[in-house]
Amino acid sequence: MKKGLRYGENPGQEAALYRLTNGNLVVGETQTIAAGRYLASDIELLQSGKHPGKTNLTDADNALNILRYFTDRPTAVIVKHNNPCGVARADALCDAYAKAYMADRIAAFGGCIALNRSVDKDTAEAISNQYAEVVVAPDFEEGSLEILASRKNLRVIKIDNMDRLASYVGERVVDFKSLMDGGIITQLSFVPEARTRADLKLAECEYKGKSYRIDREPTDAEYEDMLFGWLVESGITSNSVIYVKDQVTVGIGTGEQDRVGVAEIAVEKAYKKLADRYAFETFGKGYAELEDMDEKAEIDARVKAENGGIKGSTMVSDAFFPFRDGADVGLKEGVSAIVHSGGSLNDYQSIEACNECGATMVYTGQRSFKH
């Protein structure tokens, strides 16, 4: 028995509720990705001190979900409890991994590392210096597996078809959610529509007969960070707000009930993670391990001067801001650009907030909830 739903997690995702009466389930006119095009469902386990569990594979799958949009450059995604804690792009794989790891090395502890290039010795050395549960990559260059073997419980997973990642962009599968009574909600999976610069619309709206428009168009670098952040956002549990800068995540807030709160949490995390990074790079230990007050003061001053790395970053929200207070959280920390779905009755407030600070803002025209 089936009951139609308004939509799935987001408008554009058709969904239905099924109540099983005889154990059979037919999913209408839907089509899954063709058989034989396997990724996370066809792993090759090269090393495993412990056999992978469901959490390991779902983390790997969500990392691939994000990686599919970044095949043109070396990219690293580190996932913990099905949310990214660090994502970065660079010209070399080892640099991408280092940036993703240092974006939040605290959360990266015991995480799943996914890479879209063959793992070289330099990257393997960097990974072996940390504790991770899983490493996923399309291949491993000669000598790299021997380096990773020093971590005996590290699950090293090879996915041959990762070179086909770009072909999965725009593809839909059927998502299933089992209810506590055995009922099933099905929906078409989410596909981000804004994937190029041309897909982003400069923020404008009308309110009570007055037109509002953002004063400043984004720079090329801001457009790059907007697209990077929006596509990373597609793999993050809602409500979420993140900050990104120079193709690296700065602060990631996930799974909160209110948009202002999650924007504030992402700020708090950005400050905390940058302090830990600077302490580690300067003194060889985390900020929490510092006992010398002068050392702490030095780190605190650096982090404050950079607003936790948020100054000059792009703020990304998976849905519109109902009021300007959410946008204000990022603007007060110095974000230069904001990207969100748009569509709030109060969009004019966020436009005014950006114009007051000289920031720019674009709409994607699409919400990006992930539950």
Image (cartoon, rainbow, N blue to C red):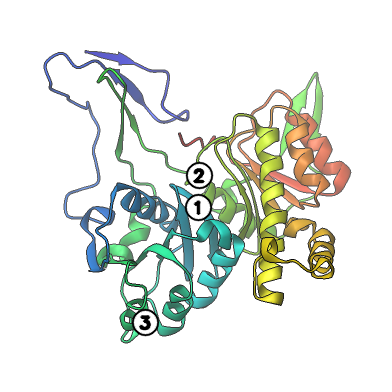
The secondary structure type at the circle numbered 2 is loop
* Amino acid type for the residue under numbered disc 3: Ile
Instruction: Note whether 297 is above or below 242 in the view shown.
Output: below
**Which residue bears the numbered disc 2?**
236
Q: Are marks 3 and 2 in contact (CB under 8 Å)?
A: no
Q: Which residue is drawn at 34% across and 53% down?
A: 56
Residue at the disc numbered 1: 84
Side (left or right) of 370 relative to 258: left
Q: Earlier in the sequence, mark 2 or mark 1?
A: 1
> Label 1's element?
strand
Marks 3 and 2, the one that precedes in the sequence = 3
**Kind of residue at badge 2:** Ile
Do residues under tags 2 and 1 come within 8 Å of each other at their CB atoms? yes
In space, the residues marked 3 and 1 are separated at their CA atoms by 25 Å
Name the residue tied to disc 3: 147
In this orientation, does residue 220 appear? no
Q: Is mark 3 on a helix, strand or loop?
A: helix
Q: Choose top left, top right, bottom left or bottom right for residue 347.
A: top right
